[in-house]
Image: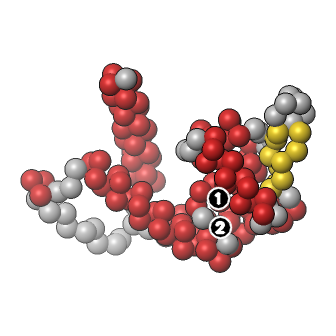
Amino acid sequence: MAARAVLPEPAHAPGLGRLVMQVSRELRTLADRQLAPLGLTMQQAELVIATFLHGEKGSRHLTSLVLTDEAGVSRLVDRLEAKGLVRRRPSPRDRRSRALELTPAGRAVVARMRRRRAVVDQRLREGISADDIAATRDVLLRVLDNIARAARAVA
């Protein structure tokens, strides 16, 4: 079993919010490094994966999946279209809107991303039990709920 890092005394330990932000920043940096050989950023990869998993959706649906606004999704789609990974086409459900679909090159890059992700996920889980991972996921989901409640209270 891998040795656990010794944390500073609680009085000097970073707060939960700071730890979450640090983990997020480090994970994004790692993901960007892993995706660079594919010519993608993490956010572009998220949009490609969301399109793969959720099929032909309009930009409004994708905003919640990739955590940006419609203008941000539009810019991401523009970049991915220029790379030949996705294409816009008329929505089969609504003539006024456009749906996004993967190109054959987009489907090929999804397969490469999934292989890379499996390796990174395995490394991230080293020395952490399945129970600890499940407990961490539960805590983070509760933190997200608390943030949402706090945001509504402020609004």
Instruction: Please say whether residue 65 is visible from this viewpoint.
Output: no
Q: Where residue 108 appears, x then y in whole percent?
A: 81, 66
| Other-residue count near label 1 (Cα within 10 Å), few / some / many at <14 / 14–19 / ≥20 | some
Secondary structure, mark 1, is helix
Please report the residue visible at 58 percent of the width from the left and 41 percent of the height from the top. 69
Instruction: Name the foreground residue: 97 vs 33.
Output: 97
69 and 11: which is toward the camera: 69
Q: Is residue 150 above or below residue 56?
A: above
Q: Which mark is residue 141?
A: none
Q: Which residue is mark 2?
A: 40
Q: What is the secondary structure assignment of the residue under circle 2?
A: loop
Q: How many marks?
A: 2
* Vertical placement of residue 95 versus 104, above or below: above
Amino acid under disc 1: Gln
98 vs 33, nearest the viewer: 98
Foreground pick, 78 / 136: 78
Locate the N terminus and report the quarter of the image it occupies.
bottom left
Q: Quadrant of residue 8?
A: bottom left
* Residue at 35% over, 52% down: 20
x, y percentage for residue 61? 68, 36
Quarter assignment of residue 65 = top right
Does the CB distance between marks 1 and 2 fall below 8 Å? yes
Quadrant location, the C terminus: top left
